Image (tube, grey):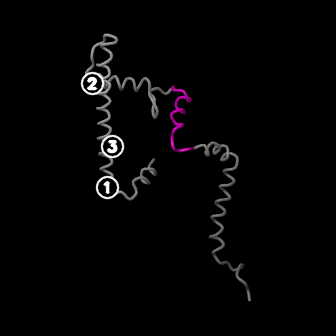
C-alpha cells in the first residue's frame, strides 16, 4: 500500500496532497449528511402513510443507515465475516484490475520457483565475475 501511495503522489507538492485530503474529508462528510437526509425524507414520506409508523429525526435516519450497512453490507466491505464467496466475487467482477494471470502463481512457485530463482541469482553474479580480469584469462605472449 505504501508503494501505491508513493506512486500516486509522486510529483505532487505538499499543498496539493493537503488539498486532496481536505477534499476527500469534505466529500465524505457531505455524502454522510446527504444519505441521512435522503433516508429521513423517504422514511417520513412513505412509512407513516403506508404502515402508520412514526417519523424519524435526522440522527435516527443516520443510525438506521448505519444499521442497514452493518446488517446487509455491500460491495467493498460487508458487516459479517461469514459472507459467502459468491456474493463478494460478484462485486469484484466489475473491477478494472484483472488478476486472472496470477491464478497459477502459487503452483508455479512451489514447483519451479526455487530453481529458477537460483538460476537468476547465478546470472546476476556471472557478469561481475567475467568483468574482473584474472591471470588465467589474459593471453600470454
Residue position for label 2 = 59
Question: What secondary structure is found at the residue carrying circle 2?
Answer: helix
Which segment did they paint magenta? 82-98
Point out the tag, 2 or 1, that comes first from the N-terminus: 1
Q: CA distance from mark 2 to mark 1?
A: 36 Å
Q: Whole-percent x and y of residue 120?
A: 65, 59
Residue 95 counted in the magenta span: yes
* Disc ID at residue 96: none
Mark 1 to mark 3 CA distance (whole Å): 15 Å
Q: Residues within 10 Å of mark 1 (few under 14, many from 20)?
A: few
Q: Which of the two marks, 2 or 1, is nearer to us in this view? A: 2
Quadrant in the picture for the C terminus: bottom right
Please name the residue that numbered disc 3 is placed on.
Answer: 24
Q: Is residue 85 left or right of residue 3?
A: right
Q: Nearer the viewer, residue 132 or 4?
A: 4
Residue furthest right as drawn: 141
Residue 72: quadrant of the picture: top left
The residue at 44%/27% (across/down) is: 73
- Name the element at disc 3: helix
Amino acid at each position: 500500500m505504501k508503494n501505491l501511495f508513493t506512486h500516486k503522489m509522486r510529483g505532487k507538492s505538499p499543498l496539493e496532497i493537503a488539498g486532496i485530503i481536505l477534499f476527500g474529508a469534505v466529500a465524505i462528510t457531505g455524502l454522510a449528511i446527504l444519505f441521512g437526509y435522503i433516508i429521513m425524507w423517504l422514511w417520513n414520506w412513505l412509512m407513516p402513510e403506508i404502515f402508520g409508523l412514526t417519523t424519524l429525526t435526522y440522527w435516527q435516519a443516520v443510525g438506521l443507515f448505519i444499521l442497514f450497512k452493518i446488517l446487509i453490507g455491500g460491495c467493498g466491505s460487508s458487516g459479517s465475516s461469514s459472507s459467502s464467496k459468491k456474493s463478494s466475487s460478484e462485486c469484484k467482477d466489475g473491477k478494472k484490475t484483472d488478476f486472472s494471470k496470477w491464478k497459477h502463481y502459487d503452483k508455479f512457485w512451489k514447483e519451479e520457483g526455487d530453481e529458477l530463482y537460483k538460476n537468476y541469482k547465478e546470472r546476476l553474479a556471472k557478469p561481475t565475475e567475467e568483468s574482473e580480469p584474472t591471470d588465467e584469462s589474459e593471453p600470454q605472449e
